[in-house]
């Protein structure tokens, strides 16, 4: 099949490369010429494990190409995926759909023959209706169906999530569009991934409801963690104990410094706004947003308390800056608020992250960036583990002890068994566990 991705950002690039790997012929379109030039040379603008090799092999095989020419790419396509950004609109928290609508207009002018238009970007309920209205207004002759097909990729695991999804949600009830979408995803039938067809609005809501539910689950266990600290219980065992109940499930029950990233914060806020607009407020989601926002600064207070109640003039070494491991993405990362709050309290910050330091430099000021965990810890009074990169899972505590001013670790991801760290003479604090 001939597929086109409009937008070669995270979603467009991963989906485009994976569709090409399934054997489809894919053109990834982007407006930014430099980006397209770099992609043609095999330079991938984001850090995603396995993506560079996947792009290279499919480009070499002639199944994946990059272009700035939207009209030429769209002309002969069977399906055109809109995968442009939908950032939070400044001021009101609604999703900014201007890029989606601009793409829809341009596609409408270029389509020939029957073409399925697929919104892959995360868009509020009713966006598909508006995309369709805009396209029919722009080109009343266009033979199109507009379908919703949200993505459920996690950064850092995007390729396996794409190739082995729990499900594929497709929002259309139009028979011609159903046939095309079945062909697009036929290679997944090998993995027995269920294709779920439903109405377009339902599909749009599934995406938000899914992310909001996961964000709520994380926030719930984070609050349980706080309670565990008060009553002397262990949050990891509570998570295990409830997670063994299949109705609850054991995923997304890791307590930590609060969720970040480009999706949960934006999507929970947008869902809460949509619900308010429809006079159907979602108080659980509103509370989740507020609790998670507070949590990040609360983690800084935890570090300050561990440091004896005062970090003025003390050196705090931060390990991990990205919102989670295996990405270079700093968007809404808890590290930002934690570091700012520590700086507000007079701490001097050194930091190390395997992939995120370049991006961090543009969002966090006044930090000394180190070349390794040990370089960061040199002369530090407190070591704080914020993001659980594998590189931090087997730290050399004997070495750290000789480097640090005081052997103190605040582990905001519960990476270590407390005994293991304390055995090395460290004072150890974690989340929702004794010590
Ligand atoms: C999330 C969803 O997991 C994907 O299904 C969805 O497609 C994507 O958003 C999206 O809408 O595009 P992502 O933001 O890449 O994916 O990352 P997650 O792995 O979900 O982690 C999000 C945040 O939650 C991270 O800050 C992570 O550290 C935190 N988290 C996650 C926890 O604190 N505890 C957990 O148990 C799980």
Image (cartoon, rainbow, N blue to C red):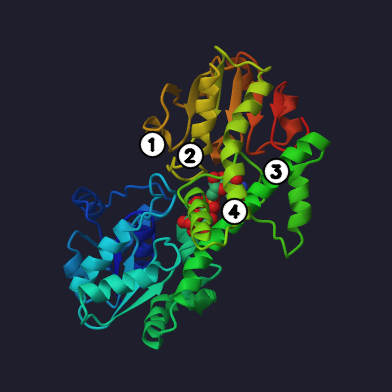
**Which marked residue is nearer to the observer: mark 1 or mark 4?**
4
Please give left or right for residue 63 compared with residue 262 in the image.
left
Q: Considering only vertical position in the picture, is 341 above or below 142?
A: above
Q: Is residue 164 visible?
A: no
Q: Position of residue 188 (x, y in %)?
A: 47, 74
Q: Are marks 3 and 1 in contact (CB under 8 Å)?
A: no
**Mark 1 crowd level (few <14, some 14–19, many ≥20, 10 Å Cα):** some
Q: CA distance from mark 2 to mark 3?
A: 22 Å
Q: Position of residue 369 (x, y in %)?
A: 43, 25
Q: Circle 2 sits in a helix, a strand or a loop, which is it?
A: loop
Q: Position of residue 36 (x, y in %)?
A: 22, 54
Q: Which residue is mark 3?
A: 223
**Could you tell which of marks 1 and 2 lies nearer the N-terminus?**
2
Q: Which residue is mark 1?
A: 359
Q: Is mark 2 within 8 Å of ligand 1?
A: no
Q: CA distance from mark 3 to mark 1?
A: 30 Å
Q: CA distance from mark 1 to mark 2?
A: 9 Å
**Mark 3 crowd level (few <14, some 14–19, many ≥20, 10 Å Cα):** some
Instruction: Please name whichever residue, 189 or 92, is drawn nearer the observer in this view of the structure.
Output: 92
Instruction: Please name whichever residue, 84 or 166, is drawn nearer the observer in this view of the structure.
Output: 84
Q: Are marks 1 and 2 in contact (CB under 8 Å)?
A: yes
Q: Which residue is mark 4?
A: 285
**Mark 4 crowd level (few <14, some 14–19, many ≥20, 10 Å Cα):** many
Residue 350's disc number: none
Q: Are marks 2 and 4 in contact (CB under 8 Å)?
A: no
**Could you tell which of marks 1 and 4 lies nearer the N-terminus?**
4
Q: Which residue is mark 2?
A: 322
Q: CA distance from mark 2 to mark 4?
A: 24 Å
**Could you tell which of marks 3 and 4 lies nearer the N-terminus?**
3
Q: What residue is at 63 percent from the left and 41 percent from the top?
A: 256
Q: Circle 1 sits in a helix, a strand or a loop, which is it?
A: helix
Q: What residue is at 42 percent from the left and 71 percent from the top?
A: 148
């Amino acid at each position: 099949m001939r597929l086109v991705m409009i937008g070669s950002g995270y979603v467009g690039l991963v989906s485009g490369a994976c569709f090409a790997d399934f054997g489809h012929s894919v053109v990834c379109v982007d407006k930014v010429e430099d980006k397209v030039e770099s992609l043609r040379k095999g330079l991938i603008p984001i850090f995603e494990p396995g993506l560079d090799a996947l792009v290279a092999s499919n480009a070499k095989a002639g199944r994946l190409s990059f272009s700035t020419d939207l009209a030429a790419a769209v002309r002969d396509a069977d399906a055109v995926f809109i995968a442009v950004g939908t950032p939070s609109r400044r001021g009101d928290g609604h999703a900014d759909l201007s890029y989606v609508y601009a793409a829809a207009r341009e596609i409408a002018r270029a389509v020939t023959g029957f073409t399925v238009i697929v919104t892959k970007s995360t868009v509020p309920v009713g966006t598909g209706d508006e995309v369709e209205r805009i396209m029919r207004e722009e080109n009343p002759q266009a033979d199109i169906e507009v379908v919703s097909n949200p993505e459920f990729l996690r950064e850092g695991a995007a390729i396996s999530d794409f190739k082995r999804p729990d499900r594929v949600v497709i929002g259309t009830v139009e028979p011609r569009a159903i046939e095309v979408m079945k062909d697009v995803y036929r290679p997944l039938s090998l993995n027995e991934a269920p294709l779920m067809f439903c109405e377009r609005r339902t599909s749009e809501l599934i995406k938000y409801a899914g992310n909001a539910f996961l964000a709520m689950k994380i926030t719930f266990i984070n609050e349980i963690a706080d309670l565990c600290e008060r009553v002397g219980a262990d949050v990891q065992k509570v998570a295990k104990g409830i997670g063994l109940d299949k109705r609850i499930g054991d995923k997304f029950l890791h307590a930590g410094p609060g969720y970040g990233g480009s999706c949960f914060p934006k999507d929970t806020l947008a869902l809460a706004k949509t619900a308010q607009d429809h006079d159907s407020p979602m108080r659980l989601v509103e509370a989740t947003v507020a609790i998670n926002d507070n949590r990040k600064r609360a983690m800084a207070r935890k570090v300050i308390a561990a440091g004896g109640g005062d970090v003025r003039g003390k050196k705090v070494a931060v390990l991990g800056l990205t919102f989670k491991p295996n990405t270079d993405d700093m968007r809404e990362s808890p590290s930002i608020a934690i570091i700012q709050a520590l700086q507000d309290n007079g701490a001097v910050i050194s930091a190390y992250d395997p992939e995120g330091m370049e991006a961090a430099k543009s969002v966090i000021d006044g930090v000394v960036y180190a070349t390794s965990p040990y370089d960061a810890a040199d002369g530090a009074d407190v070591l704080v583990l914020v993001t659980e990169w594998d590189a931090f899972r087997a730290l050399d505590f004997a070495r750290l002890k000789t480097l640090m001013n005081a052997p103190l670790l605040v582990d905001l991801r519960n990476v270590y068994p407390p005994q293991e760290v304390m055995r090395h003479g460290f004072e150890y604090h974690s989340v929702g566990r004794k010590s």
